[in-house]
Image: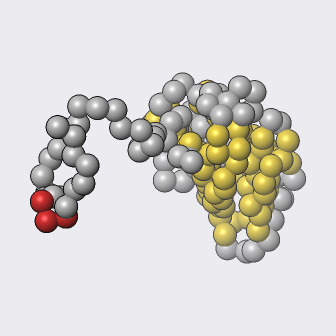
Amino acid sequence: MAITKIQSESLNLADDFAFTGTITGAGGNNKPAFYAYNSSATSLSNGAYTKVNFQTEVLDSDNCFASGTFTPNTAGYYFLNCQVKVPTLNINHSLVLYKNGSQYTNFWDIIININGLRGSCMVYANGTTDYFDVYYYQASGSSQNTRTGQDYTFFSGFKIIT
């Protein structure tokens, strides 16, 4: 017998329910998703944009992250998050997310006493050819090395359920 009307006084929201039919329009997943960090320092040349390496993968749900590059295999919108820290203070530095080999968005600062930057954004990926990299620019007067470890230099992201 099909239920045509549910009355609120007969429904206990603390109960568990076993559904035998198909439920549509609910849920979804945030895959692909990844999180990688810089376990070996990347040398950052003075006055140049340098691709940051992320050697250690903590999460790579769909094998879309390799050699510091995220190449999502599912079309959709993605939330990407990156951070780069250096041991010494920079005067002029910039954290840049590249899409398909070109600057997509720039997180920059010209402030003394900041030794790294973090940035987040939403971006569309076509699921076949789009890819993303993180670059860092610094002009401290000499080469710098990134700080290593998952608390300092990382790149992460996931597909947004729409």
| Residue nearer the viewer, 101 or 88 | 101
- The colour scheme applied to this rendered structure is secondary structure
Horizontal relation, residue 101 to residue 24: left or right: right
Q: Residue at x 23, y 37 (%)?
A: 19
Answer with the quarter of the image where residue 117 lies: bottom right
Q: Where is residue 20 shown, x and y percent of the image?
A: 23, 31
Residue 135 visible, this angle: no
| Residue nearer the viewer, 49 or 15 | 15
| Residue nearer the viewer, 40 or 34 | 34
Horizontal relation, residue 9 to residue 97: left or right: left
Q: Residue at x 87, y 53 (%)?
A: 47
Q: Residue at x 65, y 34 (%)?
A: 75
Residue 32 visible, this angle: yes
Where is 45 relative to 120, above or below?
A: above
Q: Where is residue 113 shown, x and y percent of the image?
A: 67, 73
Horizontal relation, residue 16 to residue 65: left or right: left
Answer with the quarter of the image where residue 8 lies: bottom left
Horizontal relation, residue 16 to residue 97: left or right: left
Where is 6 relative to 31, above or below?
A: below
Q: Where is residue 27 shown, x and y percent of the image?
A: 41, 44
Where is 144 relative to 30, above or below?
A: below
Where is 22 relative to 158, above or below?
A: above
